Amino acid sequence: MTVVVSGLLLTSCDADSSANVSRVTNYPVFEVNGESTVFVPLGGTYTDPGVVATENGAVIPTDITFSGNYRGAKTLDTNTMDEYTQTYSATNVDGFKGAATRKVIVYKTGDLVNSIEGVYTCTIARNGTIPSNAYRNIKYIYIWKNTDGSYEISDSFGGWYAYGRALGIGYITPGAKIIANDIATNDFTFPGTQANSGFGGSSKITGLTVNANTKTLVLTDLWAADASTNYTFTATLTQVQL
């Protein structure tokens, strides 16, 4: 990417000093090697496929950072299940920055008999309605196991606002926990209430059924958006077999 950076110095008394000053700057261009999404098993090793950043054809240094999208880590931790954003950044000679990203998903796939951990696609309905294809086969919703034995879902609204409405991760409903008393008999409890990160309100998981044969979960969540408005979200989650 090339742009012209121009500066105009104006004066009323000196024609020579009012000449235009222009120069060309070349923004960093990135060639990201490998896949845009990489899956790493929990406890495994991530091998970075790498990136090449250039300025006007010449290779320039690249910095790398990570952020855990749902659990807040600032570095990649392959012992913590999450969706991580890997950011490659570079700065050109004029101080202009550029960046490219890759998604690194650290996962564990439960058998849905002893564990409901996993990476899931989601089709999400609100009050029984699925408005469009944007709300179908959403990638991805995550369920992980906490150290206290409870499970937690990345967004108990199943991506309705984050992906269906395309509002982004600032509109998830995080923190919903699931206590699995007996997965085989669909005996679960759901402690606590949660708020949507963007809209607030109060939500609570009201039901979960698991079908180990079809690798699907159906989760319902009741959201009191305000004092007079309630919505029921029904998420059909299909476990991705990795």
Image: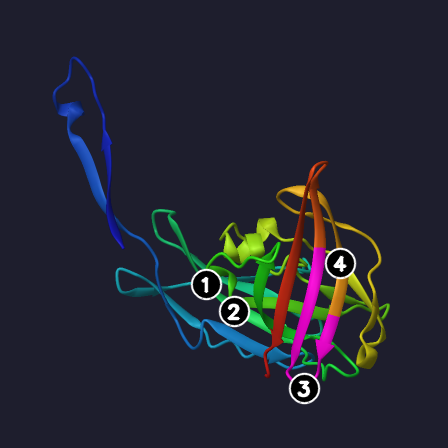
Q: CA distance from mark 2 to mark 3?
A: 19 Å
Q: Which numbered circle lies on residue 205?
A: 4
Considering only order in the chain, which callout, 3 or 4, is on the residue closer to the N terminus? 4
Q: Amino acid at mark 1?
A: Asn
Residue 141 place in picture, x, y as percent: 61, 66
Residue 142 place in picture, x, y as percent: 65, 68
Q: Secondary structure at mark 4?
A: strand
Q: Nearer the viewer, residue 205 or 200?
A: 205
Left of 38 or right of it: where is 43? right
Give the residue at x 52% y 57%: 163
Q: Which numbered circle lies on residue 133?
A: 1
Residue 137 place in picture, x, y as percent: 52, 69
Q: CA distance from mark 1 to mark 3?
A: 25 Å
Crowding near the residue tagged with mark 4, few <14, some 14–19, many ≥20 C-alpha atoms within 10 Å: many
Q: Quadrant of the N terminus?
A: bottom left
Q: Which residue is mark 2?
A: 137
Q: CA distance from mark 2 to mark 4?
A: 21 Å
View extreme (left): residue: 15
